[in-house]
Image (cartoon, rainbow, N blue to C red):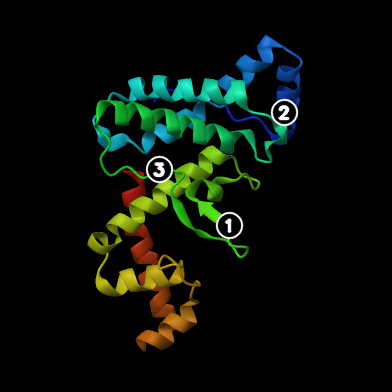
């Protein structure tokens, strides 16, 4: 895919949104261009659909344009998070209209509740916290690929260590010492196995 402009910093985004509210057309174009990276990253989620990526970029861009036109600063979220929702919705509507949506998982799939009982959606983990949402989306895609391939890429002991070390089973992350005690091996041996397993997984996410 083509190279896109880097995302705006929080301060630049705030200034750009203020300029848009004042009716400045150039600011609107700036916000669109600096967020095209979001479109590309959301489109990656549909890589198995056999659709032309450039066509999906065009459709996703429609969602981005809708986001720019409807976003308000008082929504309580970063523009990137809101834009991802609009982009993904536009793509989902496209696939549904063509009846080609299979097992795609929406970014807004409920994944649990918080301590107050509020529903948490997948996109909530993309909320800006010192990183741009596009890069966080890419990280989540890497995690998804690891989850799907960990059983085939690693042997049983390697998979156990990685799942426990990084909390992939939804539990707390284990220390190497705790894993060593569980498996009856030394901590240094756990470290070597973990390093070897991570090298295997690295090849998966770089494919």
Residue visible at 65% across and 40% down in the picture: 77
Look at 43% across and 25% down and name the residue there.
60
Q: Position of residue 190 (x, y in %)?
A: 40, 77
Is residue 40 shown to the viewer in this render?
A: no
In which quadrant will I find the C terminus? top left
How far apart marks 3 and 1 lie (CA) works out to 18 Å
| Comes first in the chain, label 3 or label 1 | 3
Mark 2 and mark 3 lie on one chain; the one further toward the N terminus is 2
Where is residue 33? Give x, y as percent: 56, 20
Location of mark 3 (residue): 106
The one nearer the camera, 114 or 14, is 114
* Residue 180: quadrant of the picture: bottom left
Distance of mark 2 from mark 3, alpha carbons? 29 Å
Residue of label 1: 118
Q: Quadrant of residue 119?
A: bottom right
Q: Which one is in front in this view, the residue at disc 2 or the one at disc 3?
A: 3
Q: Residues within 10 Å of mark 2 (few under 14, many from 20)?
A: few
Q: Give the residue at x 75% y 25%.
A: 15
In the picture of the structure, the residue carrying the numbered disc 2 is 12
Mark nearest the camera among 3 and 1 is 1
Q: Answer whether labels 2 and 1 touch (C-beta < 8 Å).
A: no
């Amino acid at each position: 895919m083509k190279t896109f402009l880097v995302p705006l910093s929080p301060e630049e985004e705030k200034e750009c949104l203020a300029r848009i509210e004042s009716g400045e057309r150039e600011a609107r174009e700036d916000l669109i261009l600096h967020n095209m990276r979001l479109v590309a990253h959301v489109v990656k989620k549909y890589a198995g659909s056999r659709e032309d990526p450039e066509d999906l970029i065009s459709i996703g861009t429609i969602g981005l344009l809708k986001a720019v036109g409807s976003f308000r600063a008082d929504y309580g979220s970063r523009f990137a998070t809101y834009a991802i929702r609009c982009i993904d919705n536009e793509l989902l509507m496209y696939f549904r209209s063509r009846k080609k949506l299979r097992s795609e998982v929406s970014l807004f799939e409920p994944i649990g509740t918080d301590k107050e009982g509020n529903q948490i959606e997948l996109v909530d983990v993309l909320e800006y916290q010192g990183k741009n949402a596009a890069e966080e989306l890419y990280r989540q895609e890497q995690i998804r690929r690891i989850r799907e391939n960990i059983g085939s890429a690693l042997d049983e002991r390697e998979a156990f260590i990685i799942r426990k070390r990084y909390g992939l089973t939804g539990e707390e992350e284990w220390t190497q010492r705790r894993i060593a005690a569980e498996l009856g091996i030394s901590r240094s041996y756990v470290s070597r196995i973990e390093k070897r397993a991570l090298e295997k997984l690295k090849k998966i996410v770089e494919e």
